Amino acid sequence: MQKPSIPKGTRDFSPEEMAKRNYIFDTIRSVFYLYGFQQIETPAMENLSTLMGKYGEEGDKLLFKILNSGDFIGGVDQDELLAHNSVKLTNKISEKGLRYDLTVPFARYVVMHRNDIDFPFKRFQIQPVWRADRPQKGRYREFFQCDADVVGSDSLLNEVELIQIIDEVFKRFGLKVCIKLNNRKILSGIAEIIGETKHLTDITVAIDKFDKIGAENVNRELEEKGLSTEAIVKLQPILQLEGSYESKISNLKTIIAKSEIGLKGIEELETIFSLTKDLNLGAQIELDLRLARGLNYYTGAIFEVKAIDAEMGSITGGGRYDNLTGVFGLPDVSGVGISFGADRIFDVLNTLHLYPAEALRTTKVMFTNFGEKECAYCLPIIKAVREAGISAEIFPEASKMKKQMSYANVRKVEYVAIAGETELAANSITLKNMTSGEQKTIPVCELISLLK
RNA sequence: GUGGUUGUAGCUCAGUUGGUUAGAGCGAUGGAUUGUGGUUCCAUAGGUCGCGGGUUCGAGCCCCGUCUCCCACCCCA
């Protein structure tokens, strides 16, 4: 007999954990609806041609690939097998993969359904994604993303509304967060000013790590990537910009005054900041010039959210992408979106114990089972209780009372309703409050109002 | 993909330089208590010491491999 196990980086969720996770999904979902987003779903697997090349070289490696059905090796000749070229071989034996995020499948969806979509299209999607990464803190191979995107609108109002959504969601969770903001156009402008446009990706990847590894290591990495010493020197004043939003902006304006794209980025950023200023947001909003984000399809605003009271990587991220649908044959459609990392939020809420009691409630009332006659007496009562919207159950076996009571106790049932010989005779019910231990016998007709 | 770390009962963990029959707490089950849980007392069940190989008279303990967990890097939610 084999010991059962589950794949590395995946998890089972107990009923209690599911109650917590559903609280998270329900909260996010209701905020999405509140802002006029509509839900869609896409398949767990996509054609590899859809996924490959969209996340950079690293992303391709982290894609889970699905072996073709049937005789997948049939069309591969001996030489190719012996060549041991796994990339080439993969293309022959696998043409599907598990989705890596929700944004690229969404872009694919938009292109395929372009004739049925009214633009601007505001969609949300809450589904698992898979990455063949090595698991560690806050990192799983299967995890849920909760995405909201707007496509077909260049307006910065979308960025502002997404920030409001982030703020509202974390306000509901009671979680203090910092929303970091930057703009890829500013990063492009910086690259332009220091004369290293072709190294934009290397620059963004390196400076993104600034807070973690410090200036020296960032510079070393840039050097290794082939940036000129002159460029690295020029970059320093920008990396070191500190102080208030206003001073950062005004300094930046002087530094990248000659970059058209950079100035455009600043202008966008200023619009977003000024529009959000009077919205009374609970979250801190911060301009972080070192925020870059890895995904290379971002072209405008970029966001990242960190929990203030917990050690955890980013719990939400997003940004604007100007041409994601272009690769699927639909050019000039701009989109902007955010993605809540439900599993990281789950971990953070767990460490901070931020779940409201209502989120963890189970059955409100459990009826004891004393035998056939008593069950027959209880069933119509239970039906009425349920019709009143109160969750109720009956213990299915006529077990000992002790067993039934401790079952109710472990399940954290709020009330136990006892109906035995005495109650049957008097058309009554004995209701026990499991928290206080108090109990009283009441007429059946009063039961529902007491439970409400 | 690279480096480090962990694995003993359902859970959390002890286990001496390698030495007889691997322990505890919690949980589970039964009883004290035939209509009363959460407190107390008693009893019982529960183990391929992750898996495979090796060293040894003898391995939970040492060695090798492998899987898993966790952590760091890469990258990311």
Image: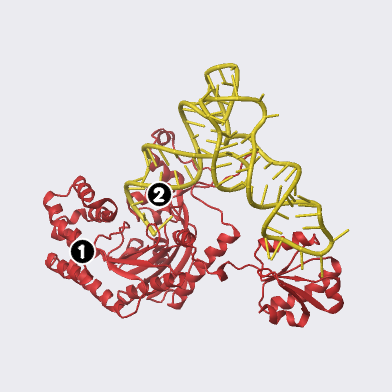
Front-most of residues A166 and A282: A282
Colour displayed for chain B in the image of the structure: yellow
C-alpha span from label 1 to label 2: 36 Å
Looking at the figure, which quarter contains the N terminus of chain A?
A: top right
Q: Earlier in the sequence, mark 1 or mark 2?
A: 2
The residue shown at (86%, 71%) is A421
The residue closer to the viewer here, A20 or A425, is: A425
| Residue neighbourhood size for the residue with mark 2, other residues' Cα within 10 Å, grouped as few (<14), some (14–19), many (≥20) | some
Q: Colour of chain A?
A: red
Q: Which residue is mark 2?
A: A62
In the picture, measured across the screen, residue A184 lies left or right of residue A65, that is: left
The amino acid type of the residue labelled 2 equals Leu
Callouts 1 and 2 on one subunit: yes
The residue carrying mark 1 is A242
Please name whichever residue, A44 or B9, is drawn nearer the observer in this view of the structure: B9
Say few, some or many: other residues with alpha carbon within 10 Å of mark 1 (under 14 / 14 to 19 / 20 or more): some
Q: Chain of mark 1?
A: A
Front residue of A423/A295: it is: A423
Q: How is the structure coloured here? A: by chain
